[in-house]
Image (cartoon, rainbow, N blue to C red):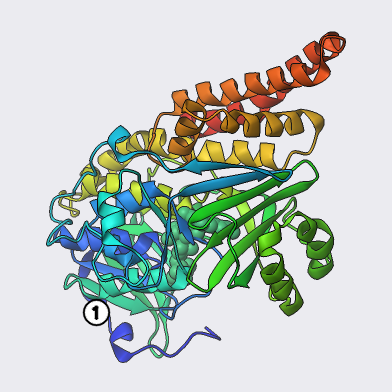
């Protein structure tokens, strides 16, 4: 456990002689929400995290409105307060120097946030007043939904503080080394390696596996539950950047480069994530950044970008895709990135995971966990119920990445068509941003809109070719539609049928 700070004695004392209702493995984004929800429902919970110190990661820094709404449902939305978070009111998409603004949807088009019984109390579904950067008026009374950008580690510490305040939760620092099973192969708890105590077995009626992107225990569902990694993001911190569109997420696209994301995460710090189309990074990152990324950075961001480049502090992460799988092992529930991952391009990971927690609390929160068969029955159903919400965000992320990282002429035509489609405004913006922000859980409407974009791309291509180019444009049009089907339908199938 090198590099991990010495924890306080309280984090090492968990009692191994009792059977907990739930053991939660991992206190990242999803673990604390599962633990808090269950504790507020009266369950006795043990949560195990290998390192309770504030992490420094480039993941989970922009939360879509659908994620903020889920935090409200769980009575945990004040985890975005007190960390100098930045309100996000929408996106701006840049394409070869042109740009289009895409504001988040109207609240009136979505409906009220659901409050989960026992979890929401004393106004904990409302953003707190007196925040130095988030206005309660804007979040509660503005006609449009809001997302939020923050320093990931600070947000996690807020979630962990909420966990610490729940009397039904015991926190433990240790490395989970094994998911424990009985002779019938049913899960009965977790083995934890604790500094000074060694490896100790903790028993629980249900073990929740929330060990994230590099999950060691997702394979307990099936050895085939393995993510595919196709690309990476290379990140840097820009300081005092002059944002072209303040309070917006920026997606910078172009015919000759891969997508670049820029969003502010504190009054001083802005995250830039640059896509690289392979899990294996270039040997000279600085050189690659200078040649392939810097020329496409909007002018107002250039000086902060150049400063960051000179500093050369890069962080990278692989981008994984993993369709969800049914939780069909008695005594275990895998959730969060351990269960299901998508491309981070659309910043949807926390939103999917948090909405999964909301659904989970509704399905099993009031059950007696000692009746493990009943819990399993509900988990089997839960798999189907989560699909309509999660598939939209997951499939959109993969399809948009294919278009935005366009590798061939058809994908480039789709990329251009997509940008021109946004430029039309009205429903051509309202629907896509509703999918992206996690407030429109309608996979078949997503399919319709995706193919409307593809048809529009064909039309744009006809316009470009002109009357003389009609026969060529016709053949290209068929090829574009075929490509659109290829980048969309297999993923939709994997999400909906799997
Ligand atoms: C490059 C990148 C950028 C992203 N950006 C965004 C974004 O802007 N918006 C968004 O919504 N999503 C984003 N995501 C996705 C988001 O980060 C994840 O969906 C989210 O963090 C998942 O939460 P989780 O709790 O499942 O896992 P994690 O947050 O990874 O938490 C897992 C926890 O488990 C602990 N753990 C692991 N193994 C053990 C063990 N054996 N014993 C004890 N503890 C253990 C870890 O220490 C960690 O604290 C991004 C992902 C990537 C790769």
Could you tell me which secondary element the residue under label 1 belongs to?
Answer: loop
Q: Residue furthest right?
A: 468
In terms of depth relative to the viewer, which is nearer, 377 or 382?
382
Residue 323 visible in the displayed image: no
Q: Is residue 313 above or below residue 86?
A: below
Q: Is residue 193 above or below residue 417?
A: below
Image side of residue 369 versus residue 212, left or right: left
Residue identified by numbered label 1? 15
The residue shown at (71%, 65%) is 302
At which x and y percent is residue 46? 27, 70
At which x and y percent is residue 47? 32, 69
Image side of residue 65 versus residue 73, left or right: right
* CB at disc 1 and ligand 1 closer than 8 Å: no
How many numbered discs, if any? 1
Residue 70 visible in the displayed image: yes
Image quarter of residue 440? top left
Pointer 1: residues within 10 angstroms few (<14), some, or many (20+)? Answer: few
In terms of depth relative to the viewer, which is nearer, 370 or 492?
492
The residue shown at (74%, 43%) is 96
């Amino acid at each position: 456990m090198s590099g991990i700070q010495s924890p306080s004695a309280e984090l090492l004392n968990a009692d191994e002689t009792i059977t907990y209702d739930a053991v939660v493995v991992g206190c990242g984004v999803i673990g604390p929400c599962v633990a808090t929800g269950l504790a507020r429902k009266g369950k006795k919970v043990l949560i195990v995290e290998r390192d309770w110190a504030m992490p420094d990661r480039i993941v989970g820094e922009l939360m879509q409105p659908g994620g903020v709404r889920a935090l409200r449902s769980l009575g945990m939305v004040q985890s975005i307060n007190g960390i100098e978070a930045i309100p996000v009111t929408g996106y701006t998409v840049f394409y070869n120097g042109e740009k289009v603004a895409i504001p988040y949807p109207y609240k009136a088009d979505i409906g009220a946030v659901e409050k989960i019984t026992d979890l929401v109390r004393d106004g904990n579904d409302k953003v707190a007043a007196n925040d130095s950067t988030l206005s309660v008026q804007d979040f509660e009374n503005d006609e449009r939904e809001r997302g939020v950008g923050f320093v990931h580690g600070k947000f996690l510490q807020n979630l962990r503080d909420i966990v610490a305040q729940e009397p039904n939760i015991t926190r433990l620092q240790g490395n989970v080394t094994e998911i424990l099973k009985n002779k019938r192969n049913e899960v009965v708890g977790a083995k934890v390696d604790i500094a000074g105590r060694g490896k100790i077995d903790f028993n629980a009626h249900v073990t929740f596996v929330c060990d994230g992107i590099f999950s060691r225990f997702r394979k307990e569902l099936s050895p085939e539950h393995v993510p595919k990694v196709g690309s990476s993001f290379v990140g840097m911190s820009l300081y005092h950047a002059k944002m072209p569109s303040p309070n917006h997420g920026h997606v910078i696209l172009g015919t000759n480069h891969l997508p670049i994301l820029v969003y502010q995460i504190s009054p001083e710090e802005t995250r830039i994530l640059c896509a690289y189309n392979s899990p294996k990074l270039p040997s000279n990152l600085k050189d690659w950044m200078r040649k392939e990324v810097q020329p496409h950075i909007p002018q107002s961001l250039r000086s902060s970008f150049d400063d960051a480049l000179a500093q050369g502090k890069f962080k990278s992460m692989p981008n994984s895709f993993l369709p969800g799988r049914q939780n069909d092992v008695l005594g275990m529930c895998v959730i969060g990135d351990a269960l299901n991952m998508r491309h981070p391009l659309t910043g949807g990971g926390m939103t999917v995971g948090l909405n999964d927690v909301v659904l989970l609390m509704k399905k099993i929160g009031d059950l007696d966990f000692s009746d493990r068969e009943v819990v399993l029955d509900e988990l089997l159903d839960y798999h189907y119920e989560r699909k309509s919400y999660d598939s939209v965000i997951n499939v959109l992320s993969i399809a948009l990445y294919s278009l935005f990282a366009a590798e061939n002429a058809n994908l480039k035509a789709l990329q251009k068509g997509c940008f021109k489609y946004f430029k039309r405004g009205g429903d051509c913006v309202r629907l896509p941003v509703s999918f992206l922000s996690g407030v429109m859980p309608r996979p078949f409407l997503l399919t319709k809109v995706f193919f409307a974009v593809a048809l529009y791309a064909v039309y744009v291509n006809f316009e470009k070719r002109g009357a003389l180019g009609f026969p060529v444009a016709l053949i290209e049009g068929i090829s574009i539609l075929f490509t659109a089907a290829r980048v969309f339908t297999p993923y939709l199938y994997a999400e909906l049928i799997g």
